[in-house]
Amino acid sequence: MNIQTLQAEMITAMKNKDKLRKETISSLIAAIKKYAIDNKIDRENIPEAIVEAVLLKEQKSMKEMIDTCPKDRELTLKEYMFKLCVIDEFAPKLISDPKEIEDFIIGLNIENFDEVRKNKGLMMRAVMPHL
């Protein structure tokens, strides 16, 4: 995911007069640009990895807001749920199924796999750049 895609989606939401979707995407773009400024990254060439990291952070934040929102505030809760759906649309999909992770690792064809498998640190070092 790149910031240009988010900007295009925001423009589409504006044209469709979908105010809440536009505001949500706009806040995502603002969070990404803020991160870029804070870390002295060129705002015109923000790497996809940074965009995805910020999206995951915003996704986690929205989930926490939903969890802490009082149940009697139904409108606020519905708004948060909608915002989470919009964020989920753009955030990278995480692998959670152990079988899927195992198949992915086997598909990497890591050299000395049996040796690496015995040491968690070596395994994480070999796998994490791909995940």
Image (cartoon, grey):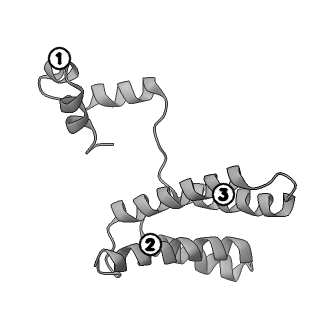
Query: With 112 as the anchor, is 33 left or right in this view?
Result: right
- Give the foreground label among 3 and 2: 3
What crowding class fits label 3: few (fewer than 14 Cα within 10 Å), some (14-19), or many (20 or more)? some
Q: Which residue is at a point 20% across and 18% down the rendered structure image?
A: 118
For badge 2, the amino acid type reads Ile
Which residue is label 1 attached to? 114
For badge 1, the amino acid type reads Asp
Please determine whether, in this image, residue 61 is positioned above or below residue 123: below
For badge 3, the amino acid type reads Met
Element type at mark 1 = helix
Task: Give how far across and how far down residue 67 sits, in percent.
Answer: 69, 49
What quarter of the picture does the C terminus occupy?
top left
Q: Nearer the viewer, residue 18 or 94?
A: 94
Mark 1 or mark 2: which comes first in sequence?
A: 2
Query: With 57 as the anchor, is 103 left or right in this view?
Result: left
Which residue is label 3 attached to? 65
Q: Which residue is at a point 44% across and 72% down the rendered structure image?
A: 32
Distance, label 3 to label 1, CA atoms, is 43 Å
Distance, label 3 to label 2, CA atoms, is 19 Å
What crowding class fits label 2: few (fewer than 14 Cα within 10 Å), some (14-19), or many (20 or more)? many
Mark seen at residue 126: none
Mark seen at residue 32: 2
